[in-house]
Structures are given as structure tokens and as C-alpha cells.
Amino acid sequence: MEPWDRLTSRQQKVYEFIRDKIRNRGYGPTVREIGEHFHIRSPNGVMCHLKALEKKGLITRERNMSRAIQLAAEPRGLRVAGRIAAGVLHEAVEQNERIDFAKMFTADSDNLVALQVHGDSMIDDHITEGDYVIVDRRRAARKGQIVVAITEDGEATLKRWYPEKGRIRLQPANAAMKPIYVTNAKVFGVVVGIVRKI
């Protein structure tokens, strides 16, 4: 019997919601988002569903990280999580592909995702339209690192990360473009490699 054959109707719907968010924007929902979507008032109510899905082997979770829900038992190789804006802010949208870049990098391959670049705001760092950036999913970055940043509106962008007093500067690597300033943003991951098809 497959794990999903043992799900309740509500667990199946929660799992499909999580899977949809991961596939269509590149990262999982928060406990709050799940609660709002299913009208579950208590975070503990959401956690019960997540624990059940985890116990049945359908998801994995990293403790103390709000967006750390991942699908379990995915095929080997890196998931192409979607396209990432290197210009204006744009929500990451997953494509249904897999590319095996994992052997090229020393980081834990289960923590790596590939994002295809859309836009030209990082061209001075030799990241161009159509390239794949390999992202090590982590929540912290050093000043000046190239990151995938998620704004409080859920928009994702590829920029250099510069925390400043009272704000965060998301700096493009294109002299013709201005930085984006936000008061609240999170690091989705740090770029550890670039793959270019030529």
C-alpha cells in the first residue's frame, strides 16, 4: 500500500496544497498559510496534519523553520524549482523537469534546487537569461552573497544580499538597474553554482 492510500480526505487535501505550493512557487507553505487556506484556527491543528504526513513518509520538515516543508521520496537529481527573476520581482514558478547537477556540488544534494534565471539584473556577475543557478536552501546568508530572497509578499528574486539598518538592500549586478529596498525579506537559499547551456 502506498503512503497516500492511507491518508484521510483532509490529509490528502493538505498534502496536495503543500505539493502545489512547492511545485508552483518553489517552496512550501507556512503553518499559517495552511491554516488560512483550510480555515484551521489553531496552529496545533495544522501541526497534527503535518505530523501525520511526515509519519506516513510524504513530507519532511526542518525544525524551527517556517517554510521548511519538503516533499519526501522525490526522484534523485535536482528539482528544477522554476524560473527566478533577475530583473523585477516575480514569483518563482516550478517547471516539471529534473536535472542531475548534484554530483557537481559538495553541499547535501537533498538541500539543493535548480532555478532557471529569467531577466538580466545579474549579468555583471555572469548570470544571464536561461542559466540555471544552483541554490543551497538555507535561511541565512553573509553580506554580499548572491541569494534567492523572498519578500513578505511571497515574491522571489535573485540578488546580492545586503542587510542595512532598518531595511535590506537587494542589489542587482547590472549597472543600469537600481537596488530593491525592502523592510522584511527572507533568504530562501544561497547560490552555490551556475550551469549554462551553450
Image (cartoon, rainbow, N blue to C red):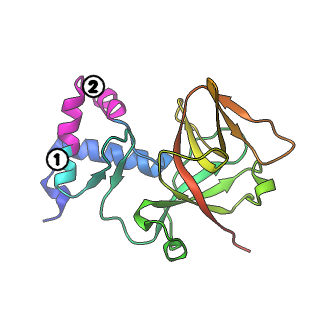
At numbered mark 1, what does the secondary structure look like: helix, strand or loop?
Answer: helix
Residue at the spot x=22%, y=25% of the render?
42
Neighbour tally class for label 1: few under 14, some 14-19, many 20 plus, Cα within 10 Å: some
Image position of 45 (left or right of 185)? left
- Magenta stretch secondary structure, dominant: helix
Q: Identity of the amino acid at label 1? A: Ala
Residue at the spot x=40%, y=45% of the render?
28
180 in relation to 112, above or below: above
Q: Using the rendered view, name the quadrant where residue 38 is placed.
A: top left
Image position of 104 (left or right of 181)? left
Q: Position of residue 57 (x, y in %)?
A: 21, 58
C-alpha span from label 2 to label 1: 18 Å
> Quadrant of the image for the N terminus?
bottom left
> Label 1 belongs to which residue?
52
Residue at the spot x=24%, y=22% of the render?
41
Q: Identity of the amino acid at label 2? A: His
> Label 2 belongs to which residue?
39
128 in relation to 197, above or below: above
Range of the magenta residues? 31-50
Residue at the spot x=77%, y=60% of the render?
126
Membership of 128 in magenta stretch: no
Neighbour tally class for label 2: few under 14, some 14-19, many 20 plus, Cα within 10 Å: few
> Quadrant of the image for the C terminus?
bottom right
Q: Earlier in the sequence, mark 2 or mark 1?
A: 2
Q: Position of residue 161 (x, y in %)?
A: 64, 42
Residue situated in front as seen by the camera: 18 or 104: 104
Q: Position of residue 175 (x, y in %)?
A: 86, 44
Q: Position of residue 69 (x, y in %)?
A: 34, 47
Q: How many marks?
A: 2
24 in relation to 41, above or below: below
Discs 2/1, front:
1
Please report contact status of discs 2 and 1: CB closer than 8 Å, yes or no: no
